[in-house]
Image (spheres, rainbow, N blue to C red):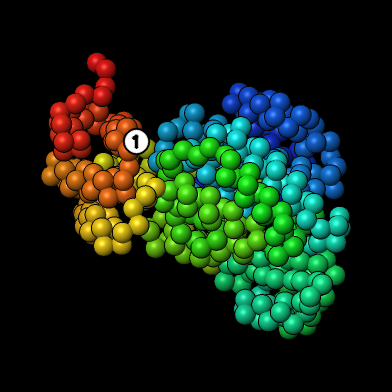
């Protein structure tokens, strides 16, 4: 079975003229960029296309540009092919893109978040005084030790990204980043300065992060359509409150990207698709896992379309698999550990084992399998204290996505304790 994870890149992947062919070929992309210009108050495509990389690299321009382009890619594919990603993840800025594509934020609200985030991050240090560099070929502990040795009360440097088994990114005072790169080169490191204009994921952004937390608190959120992993701890978000908490920490926390990929592989993901400019995330995966299928939109468009077609032809998601995904994504409002263990953890694990067996055997889910999945999800909803109206919406979503609309009434009593019809005939 093909299990797809969609990946969205962060700042540093921008380049002039990016998205030009997509904009010219996709009505969805043109509509998104038009909407973007209205919100930003300036012509974003003009900034991208005028050829001034220094300007595009400035955080307040780079972040909206990468976000809009990545989101436009997703929407242009989604319009034509309703495929079934198992997970989404984004690197730094890309996490907001992933959450938006997963339905948590509206595009308009997310763009305003990105605008605010970019402006705050740009203002975090005196222009030109912050920097970042990728360090290749050394164990992360050696890099951490060098950062700790160089840091002092006034100037700081930290490991900001744990990207792969042999690449981390250092961030902080530009002078210290340069010094650390030189020192680490003496023991075998290869360093690459990054196209960024501020020291991301460092204590320098603490004040900016506090302001961003207030903006995030005031932003509406909806339930997640697909599991999205957090940069802060490489675990999936379960509810909107968890998103607010961990996303508000992201600006000053290290990006745990290697742990994110490890988690996805443990969940059985066998195909990674990078949606955004360039292919940095694809290359990182290939470095550590050469056997894994990893494709970037700009380099492997035809391969991506073929994989999506293959997945669609293979089978639609089962009611069992979608019930598990929604159980994970549903927010929790019950902090009684014993109740949570009985009503969420135990039934979830039983249905997870059922799902694994179905995948191994390649068989179709039976009525009894679906019954177990619905009972599990009903238990999760009741335990997590999900409002009845939201329960109805989620069950409706499952039966729609799995093309089992005709069975909805058969399971209504099990779902709601009553016979009810949601669909109009």
Q: Residue at x 29, y 35 (%)?
A: 388
Above or below: residue 190 compared with residue 380 = below
**Local crowd at mark 1 within 10 Å, few (<14), some, or many (≥20)?**
few
Q: Quadrant of the C terminus?
A: top left
Along the horizontal axis of the image, is 258 left or right of 377? right
* Relative depth, front residue between 194 and 215: 215
Image coordinates of residue 92 in percent, x first then y, are 62, 54
Along the horizontal axis of the image, is 15 left or right of 333? right
Above or below: residue 263 compared with residue 362 = below
Query: Does the image show residue 373?
Result: no
Check disc 1 and report the residue beneath it. Answer: 390
Q: In the displayed image of the protein, which residue is found farthest to the left?
A: 368
Image coordinates of residue 408 in percent, x first then y, are 21, 30
Q: In the displayed image of the protein, which residue is found farthest to the top?
A: 425
Q: Quadrant of residue 389?
A: top left
Q: Residue at x 70, y 43 (%)?
A: 116
Q: Residue at x 57, y 39 (%)?
A: 219
Above or below: residue 248 compared with residue 29 = below
């Amino acid at each position: 079975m093909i299990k797809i994870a969609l990946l969205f890149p962060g700042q540093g992947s921008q380049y002039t003229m990016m998205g030009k062919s997509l904009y010219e070929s996709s009505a969805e992309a043109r509509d998104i960029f038009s909407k973007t210009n209205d919100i930003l108050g300036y012509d974003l495509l003009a900034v991208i296309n005028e050829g001034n990389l220094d300007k595009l690299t400035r955080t307040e321009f780079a972040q909206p540009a990468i976000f809009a382009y990545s989101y436009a890619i997703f929407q242009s594919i989604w319009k034509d092919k309703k495929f079934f990603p198992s997970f989404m993840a984004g690197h730094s800025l890309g996490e907001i893109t992933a959450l938006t594509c997963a339905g948590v934020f509206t595009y308009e609200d997310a763009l305003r978040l990105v605008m605010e985030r970019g402006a705050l991050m740009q203002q975090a240090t005196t222009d030109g005084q912050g920097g970042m560099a990728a360090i290749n070929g050394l164990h992360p502990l050696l890099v951490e030790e060098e950062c700790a040795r160089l840091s002092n009360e006034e100037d700081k440097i930290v490991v900001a990204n744990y990207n792969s088994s042999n690449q981390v990114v250092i961030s902080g005072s530009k002078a210290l980043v340069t010094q650390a790169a030189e020192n680490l080169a003496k023991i075998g490191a290869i360093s690459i300065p990054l196209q960024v204009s501020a020291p991301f994921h460092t204590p320098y952004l603490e004040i900016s992060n506090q302001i961003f937390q207030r903006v995030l608190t005031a932003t509406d959120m909806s339930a997640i359509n697909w599991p999205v992993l957090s940069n802060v701890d490489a675990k999936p978000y379960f509810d909107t409150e968890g998103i607010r908490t961990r996303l508000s920490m992201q600006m000053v926390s290290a990006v745990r990207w290697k742990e994110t990929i490890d988690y996805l592989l443990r969940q059985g993901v066998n195909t990674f698709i990078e949606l955004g400019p360039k292919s940095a995330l694809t290359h990182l995966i290939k470095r550590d896992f050469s056997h894994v299928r990893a494709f970037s939109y700009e380099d492997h468009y035809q391969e991506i379309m073929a994989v999506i077609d293959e997945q669609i032809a293979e089978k639609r998601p089962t009611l069992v698999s979608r019930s598990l995904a929604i159980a994970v994504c549903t927010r929790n409002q019950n902090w009684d550990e014993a109740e949570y263990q009985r009503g969420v953890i135990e039934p979830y694990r039983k249905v997870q084992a059922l799902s694994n067996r179905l995948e191994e055997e390649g068989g179709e889910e039976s009525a009894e399998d679906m019954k177990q999945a619905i009972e599990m999800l009903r238990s999760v909803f009741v335990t997590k204290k999900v409002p009845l109206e939201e329960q109805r919406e989620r069950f409706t979503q499952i039966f729609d996505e799995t093309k089992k609309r005709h069975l909805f009434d058969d399971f209504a009593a099990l779902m709601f304790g009553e016979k009810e019809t949601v669909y109009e005939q």
